[in-house]
Amino acid sequence: MKKNSFVQGAFIATCGIVISKIIGILYVIPFYAIIGEQGGALYGYAYNIYALFLGISQAGIPLAMSKVISEYQALGYYQVKERAFKIGRKTLTILGVICFLILFIFAPQFAYLIIGTVEGGNTISDVVFVIRMISTAILVVPILSVYRGYLQGHKYIAPTSISQVLEQLVRVTIIIIGSFLTLKVFNLSLKTGVGIAVFAATIGASISYFYLFNTVSKNRKLFGKDKEDISSPHISDKQILSKILMYAFPFIMIDVFRSLYNSIDMVTLVKTLVGGLGYTAKYAESIMSVISTWGLKLNMIVIAITSGVMVSLIPNLTSSFVHKEMDDVRRKINQTLQMLLLITIPMVLGLSFLAGPVWTVFYGSKAALSYGTITYQFYVFVALATSLFTSTITIIQVLKEYKGVFACLISGLGIKIFLSVPLIYGFAKMGLPAFYGAITATILGFTTSSIIALALLKKKYKVNYEETLKKVMSIVGAAFIMIICLFFFSLIIPITGTSRILNILIIMFYALVGGIIYITILYKNHTLEQVFGSEILNIIKSKLKRGKKHGI
């Protein structure tokens, strides 16, 4: 149990989230082999509607609790902070039960909304079953999120990262073993196998909750539970609840609106491809499975970087804002943007370049040839747009620009709603894959929101992006040099292998070469030091030197 600075916390949180996402991606290889394309679409239907309700029931609470706890801690209101923790737990328990009941009872209506009268794939009864199975997770995840927010608000990042890895390990283990036994050993139905797979979210969350509950209970003194408040005014439970909800609502809206992008694709893409453009239901659902499940899981590695940085940024930015240290606020905003773009830009370009072998490794050569590679090669850029969207909207929310948050969210979603179907038809008329239209609409929607948020920060808080733009130019330049070099390597060493093992070796080789080229360029022009600071680089250097000394 050790408090972390902004950059340290960002690294710890990012590592924890990335590890959990890597686990969440690696299991896809056997899981895809077990349930196939139709099962993947069914799994995506359940998870997308679940994500929407999870957003309503708890998505804003970890971040809102982190912000409230950090604010009261900075002001010395220790007992008020503890009351906020208790109120948060009670509120989320009630809200979780309500959302569970709605999702469970009205599952048939949600299922019909998703697939309508489309035949030849999953049935409405299949979708109803998996929705009801995953709805049980809403009874656990919200209360788990309160504990994570409580720890993050005190700047204890490691326990929340461990809990995420633990949750993912348990979930993935149950998904693989449960679906395999159901479908391959007992020969039960596909919906039963997928139902067990989605129910794993409930079990994983429960194990993670008990770990955090035990951690908080054993370290009571570290949180100042027994300290008296420092000249705090009288703050009622009602005022505390109002503050939590006021902080949480924009965070909830951020997550809900982000989920709505996928929901719009679920409602429109398959119907448009089948009814308007003559695609078969099976092929259209395969494309949908890339966007809703398989491609989204690969994108999670990139998006995890944003989650890790936000976990550390919120309490640190809140503390600076509460103390009216506006120069520090502006510095952290720019540093956040620089850190995110430095990591995500090369990852996205690299994944797009290696889309063929990456997709083949996870989902097989048949899927790669039929639809996977051409879809994911473009869909990966949604990860970059999502990362920028999440970071910029979260920043203005922390600064209490609630009207700005809603302006950004509504504008971006409006772009997605109005352009999605027209762009699908437009891309088809241009002779390009029609589903690129839906992906383009998503990218444009997220980008619109980000631009509005950045403009607000510049106008109201005098955030100067001049240095960030210079560093972004350096980052983009290094990333393009990396891709150009990899392209020339591909003329000698093809990027498509004949087997899964060969493709893994190809990916490892190109990732290593690309990483060395990119990092070397940024190290030589001092961009790495300017973004992360000399302290972090010195720590890395010292660890590398010790490793060499011990022959590692």
Image (cartoon, rainbow, N blue to C red):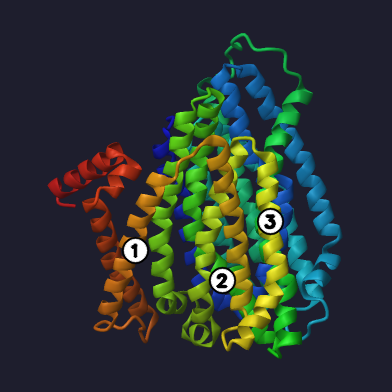
- Above or below, comparing residue 268 to residue 155 in the picture: below
Q: Using the numbered discs, state the Cα–Cα distance from disc 2 to disc 1 in whole angstroms.
A: 25 Å
Which quadrant of the figure has residue 419? Answer: bottom right
55, 320: nearer the viewer = 320
Along the horizontal axis of the image, is 226 left or right of 342? Answer: right
Q: Which residue is mark 3?
A: 411
Q: Three-letter amino acid code at disc 3?
A: Ser
Decide which of tag 3 and tag 1 comes sooner along the chain. 3
Q: Three-letter amino acid code at disc 1?
A: Ala
Q: Which residue is mark 1?
A: 479
Residue 168 position, x and y percent, is 54, 54
Foreground label between 2 and 1: 1
Q: Three-letter amino acid code at disc 2?
A: Trp
The single residue placed furthest to the front in the displayed view is 459
Q: Do residues under tags 3 and 1 come within 8 Å of each other at their CB atoms? A: no
Q: Which residue is mark 2?
A: 294
Instruction: Tell me which residue sits at (71%, 61%) in the image.
Output: 414
Q: Secondary structure at mark 3?
A: helix
Crowding at label 1, few (<14), some or many (≥20) Cα neighbours within 10 Å?
many
Q: Is residue 139 visible?
A: yes
Decide which of tag 3 and tag 2 comes sooner along the chain. 2
The single residue placed furthest to the top in the displayed view is 231
Instruction: Tell me which residue sits at (83%, 80%) in the image.
Output: 117
551, 327: nearer the viewer = 327
Residue 251 position, x and y percent, is 66, 44
Crowding at label 3, few (<14), some or many (≥20) Cα neighbours within 10 Å?
some
Q: Do residues under tags 2 and 1 come within 8 Å of each other at their CB atoms? A: no
Q: Secondary structure at mark 2?
A: helix
487, 444: nearer the viewer = 444
